[in-house]
Image: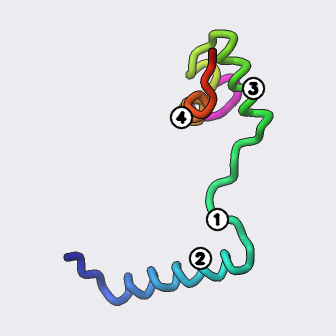
C-alpha cells in the first residue's frame, strides 16, 4: 500500500480538477499529431530505401517517430 503525504494528495487532486475543467471547456489534451505532410515525406523516403536514422536526420524528427509511422502504414 502506498501512502502519500497530504501535500502530494492535494497536488494530485488539484491537477485532476484542472484537467476536468480543461476538458469541460473543450480543450484537447495530449500531444499534437504530426503533420500529414511530414508523414508523407517519411513514407516517401522509406520507399526510396533509406534507413530509419537517415530519414529521421533528414526530416529533423526522432527515430521513434519514424518507427511509429512505419508501424501504422506498412511500406512495400
**Picture quadrant of residue 48:** top right
**Picture quadrant of residue 29:** bottom right
Range of residues picked out in magenta: 57-62
Q: CA distance from mark 2 to mark 1?
A: 8 Å
Q: How is the image coloured?
A: rainbow
Could you tell me which secondary element the residue under label 4 belongs to? helix
Could you tell me which secondary element the residue under label 2 belongs to? helix
Q: Are marks 2 and 1 in contact (CB under 8 Å)?
A: yes
What is the crowding at mark 2: few (fewer than 14 residues within 10 Å), some, or many (at least 20)?
A: some
Seen as rendered, the residue at the extreme left is: 1
Earlier-in-chain disc, 1 versus 3? 1
Earlier-in-chain disc, 3 versus 2? 2
- Left or right: 37 with respect to 74? right
Q: Quadrant of the C terminus?
A: top right
Please give the label number shown on residue 19: 2
Image coordinates for residue 75, horizontal then vertical, percent: 62, 19
Image coordinates for residue 26, horizontal then vertical, percent: 74, 74
Could you tell me which secondary element the residue under label 3 belongs to? helix
Please give the label number shown on residue 29: 1
**Residue at mark 3:** 41
| Residue 59 lies in the magenta stretch | yes
**Residue at 63% across, 13% down:** 50
Q: Are marks 1 and 3 in contact (CB under 8 Å)?
A: no
Q: Are marks 2 and 4 in contact (CB under 8 Å)?
A: no
Relative to 55, residue 27 above or below: below
Amino acid at each position: 500500500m502506498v501512502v502519500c503525504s497530504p501535500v502530494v494528495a492535494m497536488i494530485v487532486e488539484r491537477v485532476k480538477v484542472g484537467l476536468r475543467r480543461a476538458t469541460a471547456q473543450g480543450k484537447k489534451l495530449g500531444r499534437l499529431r504530426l503533420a500529414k505532410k511530414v508523414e508523407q515525406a517519411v513514407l516517401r523516403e522509406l520507399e526510396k530505401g533509406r534507413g530509419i536514422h537517415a530519414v529521421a536526420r533528414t526530416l529533423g524528427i526522432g527515430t521513434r517517430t519514424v518507427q511509429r509511422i512505419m508501424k501504422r502504414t506498412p511500406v512495400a
